[in-house]
Amino acid sequence: LGIDSVLPNTRHDRLAAVERYRFLQHHVPAFQKLQVPIFGIAPHPKLGDEIRMDSIGKEFDIIDRYNPTHIVHLMGLEEGRGEYNNFGDTGDLSTYSTGGHSSMMRRYQTLVSMDQILASIARFKREHGSKAQPQLVYVSSAEVEDQPGFTFVDGMRDNLGKASVYGSCSLLKEVLASYYHRRHGVESVGIRLSTIYGPFARPGSLIHDLAERTVHSVAGENADKYALETIWKRREGAEAGALEQIIYAKDLAQAFVAAMQFRGDRANGPALIQLGSRDTISMKEIGRRMSDYLSTLTKTIEPNQLAKETLEASTGLVTTLNGLNNAENEMERNLRLLGWSRTTETQDGLRSMLAWHIMKAYPFAPPNAVSTIKEFLDTSQVPYFGLSSTLPCASGCGWHGKCGSSVWDAVIEESRAATAKCKYVLYTVDLSSDLVELKEKPSKSKEKIDICNIAFISSSSVLAKQSKDSRWTIITIDGNESTVTEAELSLAKLSPTMLFSDKVSHAFYADNRKLKASIDDAMSAIQSVNMNSIKEKTRDAKRKLWLLPRSKRHSVMFTSRIAFPKGHDINSASEHARFVMSNFGVKMTEQVQKQIQFYQHASHLVRNNLLRSTNYANNVIENKFPFEYIRSNWLLHDLKSDEGHQLRCEIYEEHATWGNQYMEDFSMAFVLAKRTVMMDLGQKVETPDSPGDWYPLIVPKKTKSTKEDVIEGPEYLEYLDPSRKSVAKNHKGSEIYISFLSHELTSAGKK
């Protein structure tokens, strides 16, 4: 059982926690369900079985509820050195305080939960006698040694030493563990952590933002967002170049696994392990190395100058931070007790961390015209980032070797040659073995249009064995619906980037099973994805309406959806799944059920206001997780848009991860809901002169060069403040949108 405070409780932070949970679930199938925090708060709202237990006079008990064999208690984990003071409480968003900050309440929550866990184990030992107790591993901090608030020297008077809240609270956890061991025989293993670096660092922490600054600076994106003259001040000693011990995240995870198996002699008290390491470095040196790795364009301070300043500052420091003088002894002790030692060298760890941030920022393609990033990845060990590391190369969603082969590889050359002279493509995909004919409506237009008709069919189908259809260019795939994977089956529909020639700007997909497509339909959709700018308020006499000023608009994805009447629960994943399954005749399977449950859980956690303050609620316009009722019987892709490519790959990866046939619309709805929560997808804008509903893709505003405009502090404030957002624009200056052609639902439930 892993325990975390899941703080802060903003919508996007909870969604990030869900994504981390899915990462674990995807790679560790036995990983259990993520729980909303329901203990460690005094008092806390009673939920589920707690209400029943309370009615019969029994308190909440973690072992009774979960029956764990191991408990890993991560609550209270901080970056340390003063970085965590406002984490979760910035901008008057404290859960515990009205109109102010309350960093002590979350520390109190940590200590209460520690006491609850120890008390639960003590009760278990009383009731079950010789039965082995659950193995408890909890986090402490190296700040216990140098910032606890008093000295640890025997025989001396109680001189008050330097204190930090983190160091003092960590010490109190160790005292609680010692008390329960002495009075109740409760065994535990405390892990004193030094500074952690690697993947999944907390946004807003110095080490995370140094990596983000490096990556985005070299790509020429918002280089002043993380100004060096301000971010050093977040961490005690960082500006002076103080040396610290650091530990790579993967090594730390291995240490926790070793601690979970520890059964050594604890006669003199509970086990307490300090993860000693030879890695001693300053934050400024970390920043310098990252800059050197990518040769960043940032000119705030030259690397050589930074190295000189770091060296001068470091030589003047007493290197006792994080117990550096005891590092060698601790390393020997760790090897003897746990059989653990660090395996990652500092240089390899930093390069790996930087590579992870690159793949996080650019998961499906490198930024344009930046060769440095690709060169760096070619020489680095890239940690695993995405949900699916084996997306087909033919999807165009894998780079730096992160893709695999597929049945599409054999036809790419043929398909690209067939569309070499086409600006537009109308295409369909039907890999059923019993396919006899392709549906198509005759075109009413007499104009010659630069468009190709492409049909991808199975080589084993009836149609493939007959004479060719003159209306379509038929390309046969070696496989059918029963023999290819879902990632292969859905590739052409969701991510056709590599299938058509570079001349093709738009590709219109039509589902052969659901509708008869025509060139007229395709061209009508293509003509609907651009809107001209309006410089001043204008009267449209034909439509009898006024048009307000606007910039040029361009939609990178266009499809249809069902518009439900008001009152329908758009937050329900199970309702949406039933809609999709009925549309395509999908039967419930174990894997489909898993996808539904995960989406439902994500929606619940994001919207649940447990442990949230009213201050935060006032900053959220709509607390929703809106599933769009998409019906992608047809789908228009803009193949020339980087933003369109990113969106297609997000949807394709999401769908391929679950692998549920005909559930593309479900996966697509989840991706768009996530983007809405993260404020990457805005609210619908008024478009009276367009047949579709338009939703803008939004991005953080670029900061100016002045210090007053530099964005500081936790990133989540950007999600709450619309003034820090703007509509994304393409290279032509057009604002970027996605659009839907909406259909009303009739009383019979059909469009």
Image (tube, rainbow, N blue to C red):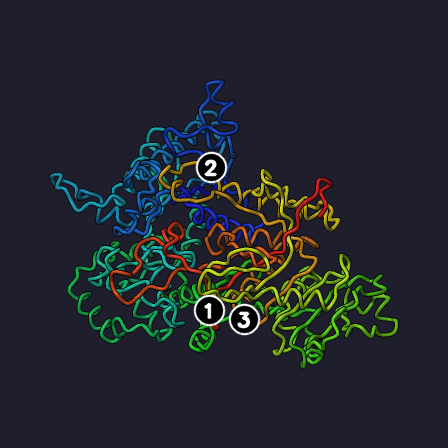
* Residue beneath the point at 49% across and 68% down: 734
Distance from the alpha carbon under mark 1 to that under mark 3: 14 Å
Q: Which is more N-terminal, label 3 or label 1?
A: 1
The amino acid at mark 1 is Gln
Comparing marks 3 and 2, which lies closer to the viewer? 3
Residue found at the very far right of the displayed protein: 466
Question: Pointer 1: what residue?
Answer: 381
Residue found at the very far top of the displayed protein: 56
In which quarter of the view is residue 348 placed? bottom left
Asked if residue 81 lies left or right of residue 155, the reply is right
The amino acid at mark 2 is Pro
Residue found at the very far front of the displayed protein: 541
Asked if residue 274 lies left or right of residue 153, the reply is right
Question: Pointer 3: what residue?
Answer: 399
Question: Compared with residue 189, is residue 408 higher up or lower down, i.e. above or below?
Answer: below
Can residue 262 be seen here? no
Question: Pointer 2: what residue?
Answer: 134
Question: Compared with residue 105, is residue 219 higher up or lower down, i.e. above or below?
Answer: below
Distance from the alpha carbon under mark 1 to that under mark 2: 37 Å
53, 295: nearer the viewer: 295
